[in-house]
Amino acid sequence: MKDEYDLVILGWGAAAFSAAIKASEITSNQASIAMIGTRMGGTCVNAGCVPSKYLIGAAAEVYAKRHSFYPGVTPLTSQFDFEALMASLGETVEWERKTKYEDVIRNYGNVELVKGIASFEGRGAVSVISERGKQTINGHDVIIATGSSPKIPEVSGLREAGFLTSEDVWDLKEVPSSLAVIGDGPIAAELGQAFERLGSEVVVLMKHPWLVPRAEPELGMALTEALRSEGVKFEPSARVRAVKKTRNGKLVEFSAGEGEEKRAEVDEVLVAVGRSPNLPFGLEKAGVAYSDRGIKVDASMRTTSPRVYAAGDVVDQPLMLETLAAKEGAMIAENVYDHAGKELDLRAVPWSVFSDPQLASVGYKEAEYPGKAVSRLLPLESVPRARIMRRREGMFKLVVDAETDKVVGVHALTPIATEVIVEGVYALKYGLTVSDIVDATHVFPTLSEGIKLAAQSFTRDIEKMSCCVERRRSSNSSKVQASGGRCELLNRVSLPQGHDFLSGQRNREDWHRPFWTAAKLRFSIC
Ligand SMILES: Cc1cc2nc3c(=O)[nH]c(=O)nc-3n(C[C@H](O)[C@H](O)[C@H](O)COP(=O)(O)OP(=O)(O)OC[C@H]3O[C@@H](n4cnc5c(N)ncnc54)[C@H](O)[C@@H]3O)c2cc1C
């Protein structure tokens, strides 16, 4: 290890890798770079995107064998070997880590990997504690990309009783016979459903009345309903008071709903209440401002200290995503070495929940749009492809600026929302209007047509449309209609009152009824 580097990067995750690679490319491998880290590849490959999507994929296959959406297709009784599944998950993680991180970075002779824990001694001075002791190195520029870790709530007895998080759930050798998931965000939804599909009796203890409170409420509620109808149990507005170890597992004591005291006896507890930034020690010495939400940065990811930058989960920002971390890391390198002057625009960054149905979102929620917004909500059953697939649990929501017709928010709950949402990304990134979306020919029959249908529903009654109608402008103007017309049918949603929504019973036969009826969501027809 040298004493001086052009660039010192704290971290070995997505943000760090993209920064190191982009800086190397721009400088034709001339910049000397030290990457200090403890876990090769960081969260995404080891304990995040890769293992979670692997488990979700396997669980979906088990579920698909046991449940058919089509009459006449007899479900099979599928057996599976969980230990073998988890071993293959581990091999996949290992392969991805080696080929996509370790082997890649070794191609860059200008990048030195330093295994150890980094902290700040001063603005450009970083000390590294490794097996070889402590050494201080200096960087002309420094990037903090130390990521985040699972947040652990202060619950009496939790640490003594033991619990799982997204860090170690991948080491399980058996499917827990019952699982209490504490949390209501994307990880709680994804892993809660995956374990339910693999055979656990899952109860989700949610702080909010429904899953994914960050999402548009209609989508979060419908997602909760879809998982509930599949067998996941929910305890809305739950506050976990204590966890105790019992002879056979764990006893979770909590209040829920209106404050009713409840208990759940379970095999395992999974804590998924969010993530905290990994703040390296000595940030004060470096003049870097931070809070418990993360490091403060400006739009070009500069911290309050000159030539010190931050990227990824460690930053105080609303989203924690692999794609965002990588984008930020690369952007810093472009600004430092190419004087690109780039700034981050979070409005066109999509985020997703890989549940089934999947939830994906980009741009503003209706209630948060600073201007005057109009919106349309299109139930999935209005999309021909969804009816053909016999999938009704879902919807599209489009939020549009009432003055300009520009699309400012796209929200989807469909079996493949994570794939479809990119249409919304382009709409927001390039300032497309409702007419632009309607003008674009989509493939028939596809779920992405839902975005076009939602756009059409601003100016016509899509219930009266043939599936072959291309478009019809409203006679007086191309502007979206803020109110009136039968197209309002889909848009006057009376949101269900909190817990009533979750208490409705839905059984197998309900699959054949429209989802909205089963979900007890009420629409008023104008
Ligand atoms: C279960 C789960 C599923 C997810 N699924 C998705 C998904 O589907 N799509 C998506 O986009 N995102 C997903 N994410 C989020 C994604 O994994 C993170 O946003 C992303 O990995 C953050 O990258 P990062 O580089 O900021 O941090 P990390 O990848 O966490 O890397 C941080 C690095 O810093 C090192 N480090 C920490 N402290 C120090 C220190 N003091 N000194 C030296 N090194 C240090 C760590 O060892 C690590 O190498 C998921 C996360 C989880 C937990």
Image (cartoon, rainbow, N blue to C red):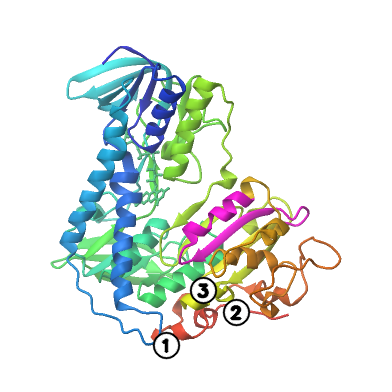
User: For numbered disc 3, what is the local secondary structure?
Assistant: helix
> Which residue appears farthest toward the top when viewing the image?
3
Magenta span covers which residues?
401-427
Residue denoted by label 2: 522
Residue 94 is a magenta residue: no
The dot on residue 53 is none
Specify which label sits upstream in the sequence, 1 or 2: 1
Instruction: State the image coordinates of residue 257 (x, y, percent, origin top left).
Output: 44, 71
Q: Residue sitting at 80 percent across and 61 percent down?
A: 478
Q: Which residue is mark 3?
A: 386
Q: Nearer the viewer, residue 404 or 293?
A: 404
Q: Amino acid at mark 3?
A: Ala
User: On screen, 220 above or below 156?
Assistant: below
Mark 1 Cβ and ligand 1 under 8 Å apart:
no
User: Left or right of 250: which side holds 470?
Assistant: right
Q: Please state if 246 lies on the left or on the right of 188 as rendered.
A: left
Q: Residue at x 32, y 33 (%)?
A: 12
Residue 163 screen position, x and y as percent: 24, 56
Q: Nearer the viewer, mark 1 or mark 2?
A: 1
